[in-house]
Image: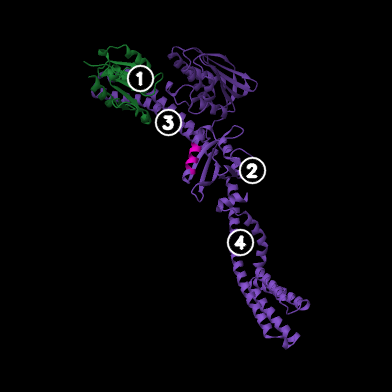
Chain colours: A green, B purple
Amino acid sequence: MRKSVYIVDDDEDVREIMLYALEHEGYLVKSFPNGYVALENLKNLSPESYPGLIILDFHMPEMDGVTFIKTIKRDFAKTLGTIPMAISTAENDATHTKTLPIEVIKLNKPMDLDDLLKVVNSHCH
Amino acid sequence: MGRLYTGMALFVKTSPMITFDRQFNYLFSVSRSHLGIRFLVSMFLMGVILFLHFLFIAPLEPITFLFLSATIFFIAWYYGTGPALVCTFFAVASIFAFLFYYKSIGAVTSYQVVRVFVFTLTTSFVLWVIQKGRRTQLALSQNIYQVSLTEERLRLATEISKVGIWELDLKTNRVITNLNHDQAFGYSTKLSSWSLEEFKAKIHPEDKAQVESTLSHAFQMGERFEYEFRVIWDDGSVHWLSAVASVELDKARAPSRVIGTVVNITDKKKSEEMLHEALFYRDEFLSIASHELKTPLTSLKLQAQMFKRNSQKNDPENYSPERIDRIFEQTDKQVSRLVRLVDDMLDISRIRTGKLSISTENVCLSDIVKDVIERHRPQFQEVSNTELQISRLVECRVKGDRLRIEQVISNLLNNALRYGRGKPVSVSVDTIDKEARIVIQDNGIGISQTSQEKIFSRFQRAVPASEVSGLGLGLYIAKQIVEAHGGQISVDSELNRGSTFIVSLPLIERV
């Protein structure tokens, strides 16, 4: 059974195109404009309905990508912390992403469709 | 004062010598004069003395020889051994001549000859001794002269370079300083001397411990070391000083003196601070800029790749009019975003190099405002149907660049929408005296007092960078444009109440 994908990005155009691309591949996609609302949603999920992958943007209002990941790994290590996460960063952000755990997947910005699909396929199929 | 500098130059107390050198200078000038002059002068002197000798004093009594000897020694000391030797022979010849021709040949007894011989010998011996002494004195005074030259150069160099010099006597714990040193500590005139405690009292509390431990470490090791620390002047201002100190040990290998320099490096530190700040802002800007630029690029890229992928899969829906429409609508939108960002960055670099040029035409301000508002209306409607209204519109003309004025108003409207919380935004155009005034008011989140001072600066935002997209340059550029028109831009705002931006431009006429 395919798992769902979560997209967390403050830019609505990016959300729209990613939604379109992944839904076209047959995935169930949920999108959120920032880390805060995404977390609120995740908190209410039961483990069976966890998404197979969460794709985050770096800069976002309310709660950015790095803070989101760190919060989950710290406060929800055993539960939400087990969900695979990917973060999309522009090159200059390397200094910030160095502090993230190794298992977090790093996607280059601008995102390549094939890279994106490969990552999603390997986690949600 | 001389002591301080000489101490620096040689670590030797030489002040008595310095004064001696001054006296010696006079002698120097005569004894350095041409040898021929010296001979003539001494010969003349000798002649006078001999004349007096033969005239007034019993010519062959012992005491007269002493008189002649004294003259010769005087000549030797002041005019040199050469002239003195010549005068000796001159004197001997005169004596024999006197004996032969004046007294009679019988007066020249062996006793007289021996006496004259002894006179010649002792005189020569004493001349030899004097010569040695004179050479030594010459060398010594030359050394002293060199030292005083060095001392003078050192004093000049420290005065010009504003280097402060200090010398701490560890037995008395008193410090002798020069004027530059005391100026570095905030005094306009030189203090007579410092105590070590007075010096320590001036150090900034945060640096005190470090300085004290550095000093005591050096006292034990007898090393030379450098250190930087802050001092607080009497007027409360804080300054950075850089010091070098060298510890001298006495014969028992215990520290006896510390000699050092101190320089005021506050300017250098301030430049460093400014550099760090500039680099920090630049790095922040680059980080934000790269993110902002890459976001629309992400959309474009995924868009294009999706289309290609669907095409390869022979998806019929790919070429449907709705799909095609949507794709190009998005493309246009993202490209426009990129164009705006690039324009912002170009504006910034133009402003920095002073090349922001505005054309000066006679434009109708009210028309410009109306146009910009209509252009933004769809955008406002999209975001919770925010109300955008013109509360007052006085027809007026200003001198300026139509496109640039539009840029300013557009930027302000964008901000009003972004921070407006969906509440109504009102715009008015009015004239007051010689000014045309545009007022854009929103009822949104407002701007804090501290942020109000910063929002017109480069790369600054009243709200953290991650809160909002955009380069944070809009208001900075707007300010540059308004001021290039000879106008002013200001803000009146309160947190959670809303903000009112006021742009005033020189008015040409009210229509």
Label 1, on which residue?
A: A71
Are the residues flagged by discs 4 and 2 from a single subunit?
A: yes
Badge 2: how crowded within 10 Å, few (<14), some, or many (20+)? Answer: few
Are the residues flagged by discs 1 and 2 from a single subunit?
A: no
- Magenta segment: does it hold B218? yes
The residue under label 3 is which amino acid type? Leu
The residue under label 4 is which amino acid type? Ser
Residue B58 lies, with reference to residue B291, above or below; the image says: below
For marks 4 and 3 on the same chain, the one whose residue lies earlier in the sequence = 4
Q: Label 3 marks which chain's residue?
A: B
Q: Label 4 marks which chain's residue?
A: B
Badge 1: how crowded within 10 Å, few (<14), some, or many (20+)? Answer: some
Residue extent of the magenta highlight: B210-219
Q: Nearer the viewer, residue A112 or A105?
A: A105
For marks 4 and 2 on the same chain, the one whose residue lies earlier in the sequence = 4
Q: Position of residue B465 (x, y in %)?
A: 44, 24
Contact flag, marks 4 and 1 (Cβ < 8 Å): no
Q: CA distance from mark 3 to mark 2?
A: 55 Å
Q: Residue at x 61, y 74 (%)?
A: B125
Q: CA distance from mark 4 to mark 1?
A: 82 Å
Q: Nearer the viewer, residue B170 or A66?
A: B170
The residue under label 1 is which amino acid type? Thr
Q: Is residue B95 visible?
A: yes
Label 4, on which residue?
A: B141
Q: Quadrant of the C terminus of chain B?
A: top right
- Magenta segment: does it hold B12? no
Label 2, on which residue?
A: B192
Q: Quadrant of residue B174?
A: top right
Badge 4 marks a residue whose secondary structure is: helix
Badge 1 marks a residue whose secondary structure is: helix
